[in-house]
Amino acid sequence: RRDITEVMPLDNPNKSFIIEPAENTEAISCMRFCPSSDVFAVTSWDNKITCYKYDHYGVEFQANIIGYNKHTKPVLCCNWDSTGKYLFTGGCDNNVNMWQINGKFVNLGSHKLPVQCVEYSSKYNVLVSGSWDKYVKYWDIRKGKSSLIGNVKTGSKVYAMSVGGNKMVVGLADNKINYYDLRKCTECVETYSTADAYTGHRTDYQNELNMCVIRDIEIFPDHKGYIATTNTGRAMVNHFDKDDRRANFLWKCHRDRYKYGTSARQHIYSVNVIRFHQQYKSLATGGDSGDVGIWDKDRRQRIKCFERVEYYDDNIKYAPVTSVDFDRKGIIMGYTTSYNWTRGCKYYKKENMKPQIYLHKINKSDFV
């Protein structure tokens, strides 16, 4: 185990600070900042959960590993409670765990298949987990082990989930999005299909729709709607109130234009992650294109596109962005890159595709 890692300003395209991950870390699945201190957690496909404490007040960033723990299989997700005291994790061992850093590591319970998402509701002090077993489960974290207080069948595998205020949205494998009111958590208020977003668009979008898979979802900071991202280089804005739905729209992102003979074509990249900046209300998306884009959903425009991180590999040119998050003060953006297995084992080259953790000091002009 390596306890201390130096964070040096390297010649990377965005002039971010790179944190060397814990030794032998494989593909990074999730990164989340603690809401109460200068700490963040990283989960990975080598079964690890690693917590780092960072210092960004000097000339250079410094970071050290303050704790780590493990599942028995790859860890897919993590999230903090509102106090920053507990970290919740889920993974391919089907377990939902709660970790008090450098303290108890408690198994709250399990699903029948891998746990894709964990979300915490500070309003109701409830943890919510979503799984490939087609269930969402609710956990009372005060009870510790065997803390299950309810569950709801979703109808399809859970791929993405977000909680905000009284609302929860769940993105499913069948390209539907279930909307729940947490005051009546076992009842689905409404189901929205991604196909609805294409209504009124050209018929040649049908091929794209057939390949569409929801990758991430995030509720607006004001809880009036949500944005879902897909593997087809798109993001869709939807509102909860029917009177606001005239403002729903679909936009292209994380794409390249290129010429093929006399025709124009596009490289389309998966949009893996979306995260709102809670102070500026703009949002960040990260994709297989190796970059992070900053967007203003209200003005329907891109504010900034960060430079792409490259692998310099013949088959996979760009390093997929697998996670994005903002620190509690809104002055640091963290993002991670790693091979994310969407193209299988064939193209994975461990020596060329090392996972990386980036911390980037935010300029206000990049977000407003």
Image (cartoon, rainbow, N blue to C red):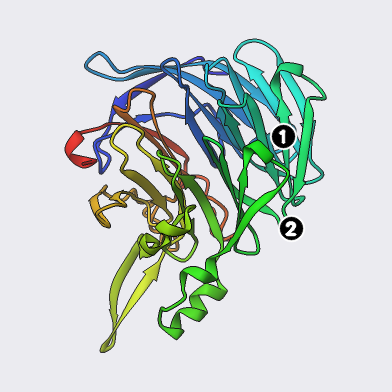
Percent from the top left, x then y, of residue 265? 33, 78
Task: Name the secondary structure under disc 1.
Answer: strand
Residue 169 vs residue 105: left or right? Answer: left
Q: Quadrant of residue 150?
A: top right
Q: Is residue 263 left or right of residue 90?
A: left
Q: Residue at x 57, y 54 (%)?
A: 341
> Which mark identifies residue 155?
2
Badge 2: how crowded within 10 Å, few (<14), some, or many (20+)? some
Q: Amino acid at mark 1?
A: Tyr
Secondary structure of the residue carrying numbered label 2: loop
Measured in 3D between alpha carbons, the distance from the residue under mark 1 to the one under mark 2, in whole angstroms, is 17 Å
Residue 89 is drawn in which quadrant? top right
- Residue 158 at x, y percent in the picture: 66, 51
Mark carried by residue 138: 1
Residue at 51 percent of width and 50 percent of height: 216
Using the image, determine if residue 329 lies above or below residue 10. above
Q: Quadrant of the N terminus?
A: top right
Query: Is any part of residue 74 visible from this angle?
Result: no
